[in-house]
Image (spheres, rainbow, N blue to C red):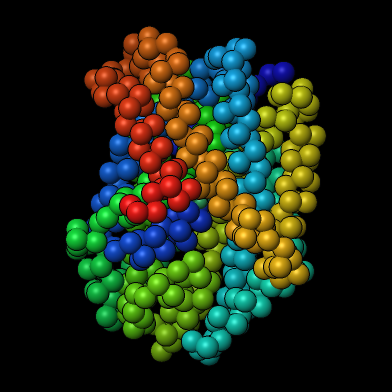
Amino acid sequence: MERENFGSKLGVVLAAAGSAVGLGNIWRFPVETGQNGGAAFIIVYILCIVLLGLPIMMSEFLIGRSTHSNTAGAYRKLAPGTPWKWVGRLGVLSGFVILSYYAVVAGWTAEYTVLAASNYFEGKTTVDFPRIFSELSANPWICTLWMLAFMVLTHVVVVRGVKSGIEKFSKVMMPALFVIILILVVCSVLQPGASKGVEFLLKPDFSKVDGSVILSAMGQAFFSLSLGLGCLCTYASYFGKDTNLAKTALNVSVIDTLVAIMAGFIIFPAVFSAGYELNSNDVGPSLIFITLPNVFQQAFGAVPMLAYVFAVMFYFLLVVAALTSTISMHEVVTAYVSEEFSMKRRKAAWIVTIACSVVGVFCALSFGPLSDVKLFGLSIFDFFDYVSSNIFLPVGGMFIAIFTGWYLNRKFVKDEITNGGTVRAPYFKAFIFVLRFVAPIAIGLILLNQLGVFAFL
Ligand code: TRP
């Protein structure tokens, strides 16, 4: 079967950035920043991106591009007859699981876009928003329908293939996303009282940095850069021979980090301007669904038009960002099914969409009718979220680092990174050192911590 490639360098960067930029940046990053002390957390986060994120992203890139295979096939080709293919399979499984629950949250953002657009939020106050959200998340029909709608949208783009589906969509949507973000940042920063939010993001207080802050920053870096499950490995399998892997990784990381920080600049100035205190309830996971819609009303209430436009644009932005990410997870599984079971792409995509939708229904119902069903004490949704992002991703990332650092031939790795000696890589020794020692040890620590082994940390 003839395999497609991305059509242009810009397309490569925007598609990979589309995967990275998602709910992780706009929803999870501000929550983590709020709960971990602001500016100091951001600095630790950036260090994690540079030290761990970049080298592991380059590893995923080189594994994918050198094999032109889905993530399980890639390990089979590079390490035939060894158990390494399980790293790829674990990635496919995590992609499947994350997509199933991510689509539920994405569905909420779509419902909020519709609510905002129909001016439902006007005149609502602090007491209304928690109710609006809990009613939505407990409503089996709305949650399921939006989840299915999101799966179908994702399916439609993936089925069209790499160049005319994923690349084209990212090329239109990513620039649109930047424009919306910039407008929102400017609006937010200009609010009265916003400077306290700006200060929170810019003035580090290092006394707040402890072990758990560092670990949260690392976890966030992985999730946000789409690392650990072979997402970027799969995308890299569509890169051309002349794609500069290090430069692409750098571009994607910079874009992803900028979007996350700008999301902070949208949210915190508005939150402070509305007079919120940063206690953990107001900046917890409900931040974008309970606190923020209220913030829009409080901060811009005097100019209802502004509150309206701000809310519609913000939720639409989330929908777009989520969609380019669900596409990338879907592609990981679709490429696997289609190539490993020699199936037409269209058929493989349907199987993935239907299977994820079935699992997605359970996630969608897990705040309503199925809220009493517990797996290891967690709801279905929380269980999937916990297992995939806290266990599968770091395990995947650790093995990717070990695979590139220890298993692969060093000359082969250098050839890939330098495109056969045509681009310089003065950092190569440091790169290998990080993959061999720094990354496995650091990630091992996150993992043990998350499993509660270091409760004392
Ligand atoms: N990075 C995306 C976000 O920030 C989510 C995502 C897409 C992801 N593909 C992934 C996370 C692969 C982990 C692994 O929302």
Corner quadrant of residue 167: top right
Task: Estimate the x, y position of residue 162 in percent, counting from the top left.
Answer: 62, 33
Q: Judge whether residue 6 can be spotted in this image.
A: no
What is the tally of numbered marks visible in this picture? 0
Q: Judge whether residue 443 can be spotted in this image.
A: yes
Depth order, front residue of 417/205 = 205
430 relative to 254 in the view: left or right: left
Residue at position x 30%, y 36% in the image: 51
256 relative to 389 in the view: left or right: left
Residue at position x 33%, y 61% in the image: 36
Task: Estimate the x, y position of residue 89 in percent, counting from the top left.
Answer: 63, 30
Q: Quadrant where the N terminus lies?
A: top right
Depth order, front residue of 442/109 = 442
Residue at position x 60%, y 12% in the image: 80
Residue at position x 28%, y 44% in the image: 47
Task: Estimate the x, y position of residue 320 in percent, counting from the top left.
Answer: 55, 55
Task: Estimate the x, y position of residue 409 in percent, counting from the top left.
Answer: 42, 11
Q: With respect to residue 54, does 454 lie above or below?
A: below
431 relative to 61 in the view: left or right: left
Depth order, front residue of 279/221 = 279
Q: With respect to residue 313, does 305 lie above or below?
A: below
